[in-house]
Amino acid sequence: MNLHHLRLFRAVARDGTLTGAARALNLSQSALSSQIKTLEASLGHDLFERRGRGLVLTEAGRIALDHAEAIFRTADDLAATLRNAGTARRALRVGALATLSRNFQIGFIEPLIGRADVEAVLRSGAQPELLRALEALSIDVVLTNLVPARDASSPYLVHALSEQPVSLIGPPAAAGLVGRPLPELLSAEPLILPTPESALRASFDAMVVQLGISPRIAAEADDMAMLRLLARANAGLAVIPPIVVRDELASGRLIELGTLAGLKEEFFAITLHRRFPNPLVAELLGAYETRSAST
């Protein structure tokens, strides 16, 4: 058994046919079949069984594929780690959920900003896309407010970074509302809310049901930056973590009318079990933990 055999086996397992895998590998079907039989002989088990025109993995085949994927992840991990070894600058590749607070993202990488020996590469996207990039080792860490689905075989490590309070935020014109009971504001004033699929919106909906309130929804957005802009445009009062509008609160462009007790926004960093982890990730996680403990 060697890596070449495992690579061919993985191609057949992914395609489900010898014909398609052979075409993708630029091999003859007979040569590919022979290599698979050699691997099966070395392992002492059949790896595929034929169903109709396709091939499906046997139980031994599923076990072999899990191990093969782990072997290739380790090989890719080693290559990605050593590719930049010995260079003067190190790269940190961060993926962030597209709707995540920009202030939070900057706060996470802040210890590396301005360092001459570090290049920070930031990309945003949907969570499934980012997790695929993480598994492919094209990014080192994913920042998100959504915990990915996990089971015993999941490769993800979930690092809880912080819990942020959630407040009712409005423009300076809403200053006259300061001091009024929050349940009254939630029922009487137009609100700017996260979209229903978000964890924060689910918590908000549960809260207003418990309070017996029917909120007036002026706008919904799945992007924290858009919630901030809608609040600045006087579209209503935004249900949003203050960290998202930190600069606006400091400058007076927005004001905080009160904290919504029981609501919180959680932020996470997602990494992989890696034999050769990027040391910059551990550095940032440690720095964030230290800052959180001191506040």
Image (tube, rainbow, N blue to C red):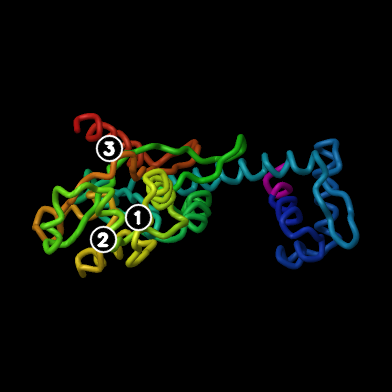
How would you rate the neighbour count of disc 3 (Cα within 10 Å): few for under 14, some for 14-19, many for 20 or more? some
User: In what quadrant of the picture does the N terminus appear?
Assistant: top right
> Is 50 within the magenta?
no
Q: SS of the residue at dot 3?
A: helix
- Which residue has dot 3 on it? 288
Q: Nearer the viewer, residue 212 or 154?
A: 212
Where is residue 28 shown, x and y percent of the image? Answer: 81, 65
> Is 2 within the magenta?
yes
Residue type at the position of mark 2? Glu
Tell me the distance, in whole angstroms, between the alpha carbons under discs 1 and 2: 26 Å
Instruction: Give the residue at x 16% y 62%.
Output: 171
Where is residue 89 shown, x and y percent of the image? Answer: 28, 50
Q: Earlier in the sequence, mark 2 or mark 3?
A: 2
Q: Nearer the viewer, residue 253 or 106?
A: 253
Q: Which mark is residue 189?
A: 2
Residue type at the position of mark 3? Tyr
Indicate whether 41 appears above or below 7.
Answer: above
Q: Are marks 1 and 2 in contact (CB under 8 Å)?
A: no
Instruction: Give the residue at x 73% y 48%.
Output: 5
- Which residue has dot 1 on it? 100
In magenta, the rendered stretch is 1-6
Residue type at the position of mark 1? Leu
Mark 2 or mark 3: which is in front? Answer: 2
